[in-house]
Image (cartoon, rainbow, N blue to C red):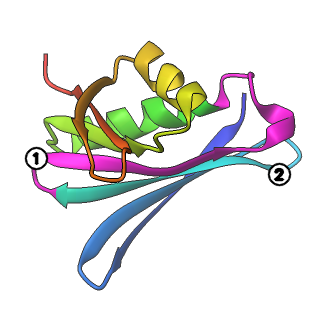
Amino acid sequence: MPTLLRLDCDIDGNEETKIVAIDSELQFVGTVGLQYKHLRSANIRQLYVDTARRGQGIGVMLVQECRQIARNGGCETLGLVVDKANDKARKFYEKLGFAFAYQYDNGDDLMTIGLRA
């Protein structure tokens, strides 16, 4: 499995964590951003896994890392926006426990998962 590298940054007051997955040859295999909306929630942003490495559990690993970071940071919910035409992504997130929460005017869906037991 890949190694995860974490970079925490604050750009213009927006706290964000970038997580990059690299393989044993130090090649990029995936990335995800985690943005903190406020103290109680965070959003996954721009999950990407290299097309040649999809289906190997890297996306799951990146999302699970986001969940852990958000939970450890005291967040109660983790959300993400799924493009209205991206059924594959929607099903991926549903398998990980995310559920529909809201539909935006453009048709994109907000999906969330609770982080507290």
Residue at (63%, 47%) from the top-left corner?
48
**Left or right for 40, reference 25:** left
Q: Give me the C-alpha separation between circle 1 and circle 2.
A: 34 Å
Relative to the observer, which residue lies in front, 109 or 35? 109
> Residue 28, image x and y in percent?
77, 52
Q: Is residue 104 above or below residue 51?
A: below
Residue at (41%, 59%) from the top-left corner?
17
> Residue 38, image x and y in percent?
13, 58
**Residue 60 is at least partly visible in this image:** no
| Residue picked out by circle 2 | 26
**Left or right for 91, reference 50:** left
Relative to the observer, which residue lies in front, 73 or 16? 16
Q: Amino acid at mark 2?
A: Leu
Q: Secondary structure at mark 2?
A: loop
**Residue 84 is at least partly visible in this image:** yes
| Dot placed on the residue nearer the N-terminal end, 1 or 2 | 2
Q: Is residue 99 above or below residue 68?
A: above
Q: Is residue 38 above or below residue 59?
A: below
Q: Secondary structure at mark 1?
A: loop
| Residue picked out by circle 1 | 40
Look at the numbered discs 1 and 2 and tell me whether their residues touch, using CB distance below 8 Å: no
**Left or right for 51, reference 58:** right
> Residue 52, image x and y in percent?
87, 36
Q: For residue 79, what is the image quadrant? A: top left
Q: Which span is picked out in magenta? A: 38-58
- Assess disc 2: are there few (<14), some (14-19) or many (≥20) residues with their C-alpha within 10 Å of its C-alpha: few
Of circles 1 and 2, the one toward us is 1
- Assess disc 1: are there few (<14), some (14-19) or many (≥20) residues with their C-alpha within 10 Å of its C-alpha: some
Residue at (40%, 40%) from the top-left corner?
66
